[in-house]
Amino acid sequence: MLVLTELTKNFGGFRAVDHCSFSVAEGTITGLIGPNGAGKTTLFNLIAGALSPDSGTVAFLGEDISHLRPHRRFARGLVRTFQIPHEFHRLTVLENLMVAADHQDGERLWENWLAWKRVTRREDEVRARAEDTLAFLGLTHLAGERAGNLSGGQKKLLELGRTMMTDPKLVLLDEPAAGVNRTLLREVEEKILRLNRERGFTFLLVEHDMAFIEKLCDPVICMAEGRVLVEGDFETVRRNPHVLEAYLGESTA
Ligand code: ADP
Ligand code: MG
């Protein structure tokens, strides 16, 4: 689904991503780990289009998208979670989901004048989808709550819901476990698994919580100093001495 070939990104004289190559197979939840400064976030920016590579290519569904603008990648189903604007605090949970769908549609103002019937029908459809999404997430009881009043974990669930509303194919998740309490973390895990198994979403996720990675991700890719160090199932990566070394390097630094 996603093929990165020899991606390189320099910041001045510093090489943050260094001839990095790997693939994400359709249907997987691929985990990306590595010590701080390994280049994970820079890599996400290259995949989503927030940054352009100095060399190398990003291919998505068989096409070279290295030079596509971020919104074009988004329109093809390559969605980075925080690419969708953060939740609107004063809108309700339900409204937040509905707005996420419209964002994708690129709905234009004149439609409201020329085709109000169609727009109304569309709004009903979007509302029905938003209600389904809430039921899937177990957030129906919060439909009318202002998003600003949700807990950290509930906001993560809402963020997943907003992603669902855009019909993604590949979802890039940046630290989905960060700031989520244990109970809600189980729920976030379960929802990601179900989105993968039942709805066919492919995920590439960066996470520091190793229990989370172990439970969800296969394969796991470990980066260090801008390159892929090891790739394999969780146990293979965990047992690899270079991985330990890379993390120890981080803690001594
Ligand atoms: P990770 O997400 O794995 O912690 P990053 O991709 O954020 O790593 O950073 C990789 C390296 O690139 C770090 O040393 C970081 O300081 C550097 N870096 C990241 N973004 C920039 C930037 N915009 N300008 C200069 N250096 C940067
Ligand atoms: Mg980072």
Image (cartoon, helix red, strand yellow):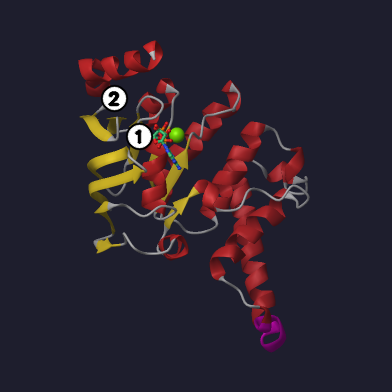
Q: Taking the image as drawn, is residue 240 in sight?
A: no
Q: Is residue 189 above or below residue 120?
A: above
Q: Is residue 103 above or below residue 111?
A: above
Question: Going 75% across and 51% down the picture, which residue do you hit?
Answer: 92
Q: Identify the residue at image location x=37%, y=64%.
A: 68
Q: Which residue is mark 1?
A: 31
Question: Residue at position x 57%, y 21% from top?
Answer: 182
Q: Amino acid at mark 2?
A: Phe
Q: Quadrant of residue 217?
A: top left
| Pointer 2 residue Cβ closer than 8 Å to ligand 1 | no
Contact check, label 1 and label 2, Cβ < 8 Å: yes
> In x, y percent, where is residue 19?
22, 42
Q: Which one is earlier in the sequence, the residue at label 1 or at label 2?
A: 1
The segment highlighted magenta reads 110-116
Q: Predominant secondary structure in magenta?
A: helix
What amino acid does circle 1 point to?
Answer: Gly
Relative to 86, 148 lies left or right: right
Identify the residue at the far bottom of this view. 114
Q: How much space separates mark 1 and mark 2, taking CA atoms?
A: 9 Å
Instruction: Name the one closer to the observer, 122 or 212.
Output: 212
